[in-house]
Amino acid sequence: MKRVYLDYSATTPTKKEVLDAMLPYFSEVFGNPSSIHGFGREAKKVVNESRATIAGFMNADEKELYFTAGGTESDNWAVKGAAKALKNKGNHIITSKIEHHGILHTCESLEKEGFEVTYLDVDGDGLISLEALEAAIKPETVLISIMFVNNEIGTLQPIKEIGAIAKAHGVLFHTDAVQAFGNFKIDVKDMNIDLMSISSHKIYGPKGIGALYIRKGVRLVNFVDGGAQERKKRAGTENVPSIVGFAKAAEIAYRDFDAHVEKLVALRERLRKGVMETIDYCKYNGHPDQRHPGNAHFAFEFIEGEALLLSLDLVGIAGSSGSACTSGSLDPSHVLMAIGLKHEIAHGSLRLSVGDFTTEEDIDYTIKELKTIVERLRMMSPLYDKVTGGK
C-alpha cells in the first residue's frame, strides 16, 4: 500500500542533515552549558552559536532569543509573562477567535485571575479587521496577540500593519509564528514585533524545542523558575542536541527558502485544483492567496471528518480534520465556526498540508482516493440522497 504523509502542519520529519548535526552533542560534546569547565564551555559555545543563527533569520539580536520546550510554552510565557509584568498598567488583552489553543487557553486562564480579554472576530477568509483591532484598544490594553499564520486554515494575517497599530498605541505585540517561521521571511524590527513564538518541529527539526523572541527592553515575568539558565529568564538545563538541530533546520529552511516555497505552492495548487474540480459540494477554506504555502483546507458536505480521516488512513494517506470529533468532542473546530461555516459542513473538514518530501504522485494518488472515499461516504448519508435525489 502506498503511504502518503500530508500532515506537515502537525509535524515534520527531522531531516538527515539536521540529525547528523545533532549526533555529536549526545555523547561527544555532552557537557552542561552551565558548567565552568571545558566540557561545559564547549556546550555553551554551540548553544550561543545556534541562538545567533536562529536570531539572524528574524533580524533579531541573539540576546533577544530564549530557548523553550516548544511553541506552546513560548505562547504561555509571552502572554502570561507580559500580562503579569504589566498588571499595574492595565489588565486588558486583545487576541482573535481563531488562535491556537496555546493562546486561547492561556487567555482563559488569565480571565480567571481578573484580566479582561477581547476576542476579535474574523471574516470568512479568517482575517481580522485592522479597524476593529484599533477600536478595541483602550487605556488598560497591555498586549495584542495575533497569530502570524493560522494552523488550521492557513490564513496569513497582516502582521506588519498589526505591529504598527500596536506601536502607535504603546501596546506590546506578540505573534505565534510557529507555522510561519521557515515558510515566510520575518523581520521583527520592520514588523514591530515585540514577542514571537517559534518551534523546531514545524521546520524539519526535532520536537521538544522552541524559542521566544523578546525584544530588548520588554519585561516579562519568568515562566519557569529555578536555575540561572537563559540569562536568568528560563530555568532548566539547555537541551543542547535539540538546540543544535533547531539551528540547522532554520539554516536549511532559509538557505533553500525560494525553492521550498515554490515547490509547496505548486503542490498545494495541484491538490486544490484536483479536489475542487473532481469533488462537488466542497468548500476551500482560508484566504485564497494570503496563506501558508503548503496548507490546503477543505470542507465536504454530507460527511463526517472522523470517517473521512479513518478512510484515508486505510489507504495510507495521513491528514487531519478541522473537526474536534477525533478528540471526543461533538463540537466542530472553533476556527471553522469563527469563519462562519455551518456545523454540519465544519464537521466534514479536512486539512492536507504538503511538505518538502511530497511528490506530484502523492498528490494525484490522494485526489483519486479522496474522490472515491467521499463518494462512498456520501452514499451512506440520507441527507446527501435527499439533496441530490440519489445522483
Image (cartoon, rainbow, N blue to C red):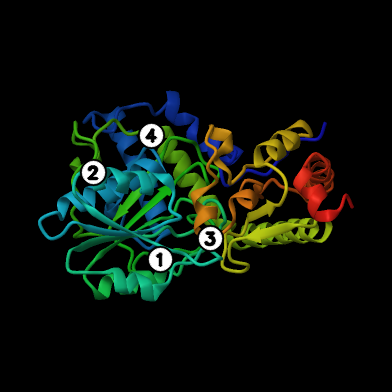
Q: Classify 274 as above or below 136.
A: above
Which quarter of the picture shows residue 95? bottom left
User: Who comes first in sequence, dot 2 or dot 1?
Assistant: 2
Mark 1 residue element: loop
Which quarter of the picture shows residue 292? bottom right
The residue sitting at the top extreme is 27
Marker disc for residue 187: 1
Residue at point 23%, 73% (across, down):
169
Mark 2 residue element: loop
What type is the residue that disc 1 sits on? Answer: Asp
Residue that numbered label 3 is attached to: 339
Q: Compute the Cα span from label 2 to label 1.
A: 34 Å
Q: Split into 4 quadrants, where in the image is the N terminus?
A: top right
Residue that numbered label 4 is attached to: 240
Camera-side mark, 1 or 4? 1
Residue 162 image offset from top left, x and y in percent: 37, 70
Residue at point 37%, 72% (across, down):
132
Whether the residues at callouts 3 and 2 have beta carbons within 8 Å, the answer is no
Mark 3 residue element: loop
What type is the residue that disc 3 sits on? Answer: Ile
User: Who comes first in sequence, dot 4 or dot 2?
Assistant: 2
Q: Residues within 10 Å of mark 1 (few under 14, many from 20)?
A: some
What type is the residue that disc 2 sits on? Answer: Lys
Whether the residues at callouts 1 and 4 have beta carbons within 8 Å, the answer is no
Marker disc for residue 112: 2
Q: Compute the Cα span from label 3 to label 2.
A: 27 Å
Along the horizontal axis of the image, is 257 left or right of 188?
Answer: right
Along the horizontal axis of the image, is 87 left or right of 340?
Answer: left
Q: Compute the Cα span from label 1 to label 3.
A: 28 Å
User: Who comes first in sequence, dot 3 or dot 2?
Assistant: 2
User: Who comes first in sequence, dot 1 or dot 3?
Assistant: 1
